[in-house]
Structures are given as C-alpha cells and as structure tokens.
Amino acid sequence: MKKQLLYILCLLVAGQMTVQQALAQGETTTRIVLEHGAHGGKRTDAAMQHWREYGLGQFIHWGVYAIPGGQWNGKTSTYAAEWFRTSGLIEKSEYDNLYKQFNPTDFDAKKWAKQAKQMGAKYMIFTTKHHDGFCMWPSKYTGYTIANTPYKKDIVKELVDAYTAEGIDIYLYFSIIDWSHKGYQANAPKTEADKARYETFKTFTRNQLIELLTNYPQAKGLWFDGSWDKAWIEQAAWVDDLGKELRAMSPGLIIGSRFRADEFGKRHEDSNGDLIDDYDQRFERNLPNSLAELKGNDWDCVMTIPENQWGYHRDWSLSYIKTPYDLIEMMVKANALDGNFVINFGPDGKGNIRPEETTIANRIGDWMAVNGAAVYGTHHSLLDKQDWGYSTQKDNNIYLSVFNKPMNNLVRVKLPKSKTKENVYVIDNAQLLSTKAPVQINGEGKTGTYYRDKTGASYYDLIIPESIRTSTQPFVIVIQLKEVDKKNQDDYMQAII
Ligand code: FHN
C-alpha cells in the first residue's frame, strides 16, 4: 500500500497522472498544489457577466490567405483555406510574398459592422494574426504587416472603431503559432541554440500582445489559438506570468482556456480538473450535449458555415453549407446549455463578405429581431431537454424554441416536478414570442394538464397557432409557470387531471 502511494505520488509530481486518475485507482488523494493551474475559480465580475449574456458572436478570419482563397494555378485545396501556405499548392516563399499584393479596396469596416449588428452579434473576434504570422495591424516588431502592403491602413483599428461604434464588443484573435518568426518552434527546443532562438520568439510574442492591448484598449478580451505546441506548453510559468501582466494592463480582460497549460502540461483543465482561465474554448465546430459535461464552466462554440473553412475559400461546393436554420438551432442549443455561439465569416481578398454569408447573416438577423429574447441574457431553463427543441430562461420567462414542429401541431411540454412536495407546476401564461399572440393550452379551462408521470412531472399540450403552422422557420413560445398547492383543490385538479 505504502509503495503504491509512493508510486502515485511520483506520477503526480512528474505530471504523468492527474488527480482524477489517481482517484480512479482508489486513492482519496485531495488536490495537488499547482502554481500555474486555474486561478480563482469562476469569475463573477461585471465584465464576465456581460460576456455570459452575449448569446451570439461573429468570428472573422481574414488575412493574406484570402488572396488565393484555397486555389492556386488552377488547383484547389480541400483543406482549410487559412492554412493554404501548407497546402503544397504554393511555394512557401511565394506565399510569404503575397502580402505585397494585399489591397482590399472594397473593404468597408462600417459595412461589416452594420451587417454584424443586423445579424444580432453582440461581440466580434477578429484574426489580428493567424498562423502565417501576417499582422493585420502595423506591428512595430515585424515587417510582415498590413503597413507594408499596398493597402497600408490599420485594419484592426478600422474594425475596432467600426464595431465599437455599433455597440459590438471586440475580441482579438492571436495565434501563438507564427510561421514567419525565425525563433518560432513547434517542438520543445532541445539545444542551447534552439532555446535561445525560442527566447526571441517569446519576447516578440509578449511585445506584440502588449502592443495590441496598448493600441486597442477597447478590446474586451484576447482569443488565443495554436497554443498546442510543445514548445509553448513547456513555458507554463512564463505564459502564466504573461497572462497576469496582460490582465493587469486591461482590467476585466477575458481570456479563454487556449492560452496556457499548467506546469504538468495539462491544457484547458489543469491537473486538478479545474478550468484554466475564464471559459472553455474546446468547442470548435462542435457542441456539447448536456450540462453535465460542462461542469458548470463558461464556454463558447465557434462554428464555420462550410465544414472546415475559416478563411475565404473560393469553392464552397466542397462541403455542406449550413443553413440559417442549422445555425439558429445550434445557437439556441448553445444558449440552452449556458454557452455563447460564434459564427465565422471569411471575407475575400478584396474585402467583401461573400454574398452567401451576407444572406445567411441577414436571415439569422431577421430571426433574432423577433426572437432574440430567447437568446440574449438567457440561461438553461428548469425544463428537461425535449424533442421539439430547446428551452432557455430569463427570470420567470421560459422560452420554448421549437425546431421539430410536431405533425399534430401540439407541442407537448414536460414541466418539472415541484421541489415542494405538495405542489405541482402549471403553465400560467403562454404566448408566441414573435407576435405576443396567446397560445392556447389543450383543454384549457377544463383539464389543463395532459397527464402526470410517476415522478410527479406534469405535461401540457400547447396548440401551435394557425398563423405559424405553415412557416418553415423555428418559432418561440414563451411561458410562465405557477406552482399550485395541492391543498388548493380547484387549481390542483386542473393541474393534474
Ligand atoms: O488552426 C486554426 C484554424 O485555422 C482556425 O483558426 C480555428 C478557429 O478556432 N483554430 C485553429 C484550429 O483549432
């Protein structure tokens, strides 16, 4: 036994095992002391609360990769367009000179911001620098920037100003991977020379991050990417210190779980299983299915419109293109599970958001204009997940977003069992969110409830109004519940029959 304990202790110290694994081996070990794990638990400050209420965001991937747009010399890459430098279809040296042609004369930051506003986005994440290292702002730490293109103007500034003017918060995407920097390495540096080179990269990265927060103090957060490199993971203590420095520069700054690892190389969750930094960034093109798997953490989901294209790709026939319906459903699902949903756009080399993306943004905006209350500032509701769709809640309002319209036009709603033994829940009021028209409950005034199951949950059938039966759009019914005391016979009978 002693030996086993010692062995587990050694593994923990060496970072070969997490506390959870140790527990799974029957140990009752408590937490290990981490210097660079999660700090401080879930944030409760106003900036983070504001983040939680966004509901919908916009992501924009834009850089020199928009010039080839996934195609070169008549050949098409099926891989992500923003990775085009590695596609094998272009010489790296040729790619590295493309910036000399970058001249997006159609770019109109105000137009983009207005479109995002119409879509209903409350925040925008912009790629200041993707993996190729090209900077969309005039960084003084490299020549590989927008300042040295024919366009010259500071694109990050134009966007920060335009989106801020529309009341949309800005987050700066920053790639830790930087193929343009001589000191950059993906693998952990082994030789002294490599280590020294990597130090120059660390200094460069720190300088650029400080520069970004200095130039664009309106930024509410940094959205890191590419932090999976072994070289970066090994710098846990230094990255942690850098994070603290950045947070001190910009009070309230929001940073997700893709920035740093703990001292044992654990990413996203530290070796105690706690979320590193402010929200879980693991949901890329992927949504969770239950609250349980989220462990109460804040999170966002970033989603592409085609399958796996973030930057502009000329050929959208390569994969299924998500419809406004698909994206609205994902957005509502994300919010029903307490997350934010972020839709990506990849403008072309001239600065145009492609017409297909504009149409999608407009359709989503039309839906949000009437149904946004089901998304903004809501959280998961006290209802279980049900077949017709997803439910969200704000104060006493429960929003039933119906995506699978039942053929018989009855939306059967399962209400939870009351926590008070003698009580049951009934629907006090139901109306269509879009028109405020009352929604009739089947048997209203006679029976009210369809039935109660053995757990004490009651079921109601809401009759879908005639006016929306032929609509192909998801719709929202907003309900309020009332608890009825069993002793109040009249109400109670109405509730349980
Ligand atoms: O490699 C990138 C990819 O190009 C894109 O930027 C996404 C966005 O979340 N992040 C990386 C893959 O995880």
Image (tube, helix red, strand yellow):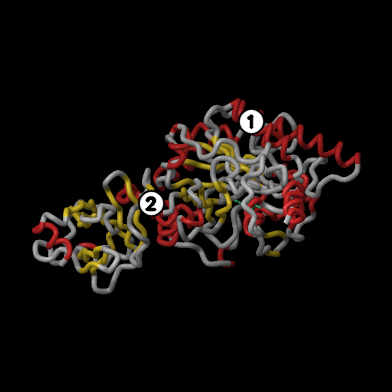
- Residue, disc 1: 244
Circle 2 SS class: strand
Q: Is the C-beta separation of discs 1 and 2 under 8 Å?
A: no
The type of residue carrying mark 1 is Lys
Q: Is residue 7 visible?
A: yes
In the picture, measured across the screen, residue 172 lies left or right of residue 391, that is: right
Residue designated by label 2? 380
Residue at x-position 72% and y-position 53%:
5
Image quarter in which the N terminus is found: bottom right
Position of residue 459 relative to residue 162, above or below, is: below
Task: Locate residue 141 relative to residue 78 in the image: left or right.
Answer: right
Whole-Å distance between the Cαs marked 1 and 2? 32 Å
**Crowd rating for badge 2 (residues with CA inside 10 Å; few <14, some 14–19, many 20+):** many
Q: Is residue 220 shown left or right of residue 450?
A: right
Q: Find residue 467 and report its horizontal and vertical position in percent.
A: 20, 62
Instruction: Residue at 59% x, 36% y: name it.
Output: 39
Q: Can residue 105 be seen in this view?
A: no
Q: Residue 269: x percent and y percent?
A: 61, 48
> Residue placed at 39% from the left, 45% from the top?
118
Query: Quick one: label 1, few (<14), some, or many (20+) residues within 10 Å?
Result: few
Residue 26 point in image, percent of width and height: 63, 58
Percent position (x, y) of residue 364?
A: 39, 53
User: In the image, what residue type sits under mark 2?
Assistant: His
Q: Answer above or below: position of 172 versus 370.
A: above
- Using the image as rendered, state which of residue 96 and residue 454 is in the foreground: 454
Instruction: Please count the marks in the image.
Output: 2
- Residue at (77%, 55%) from the top-left corner? 3
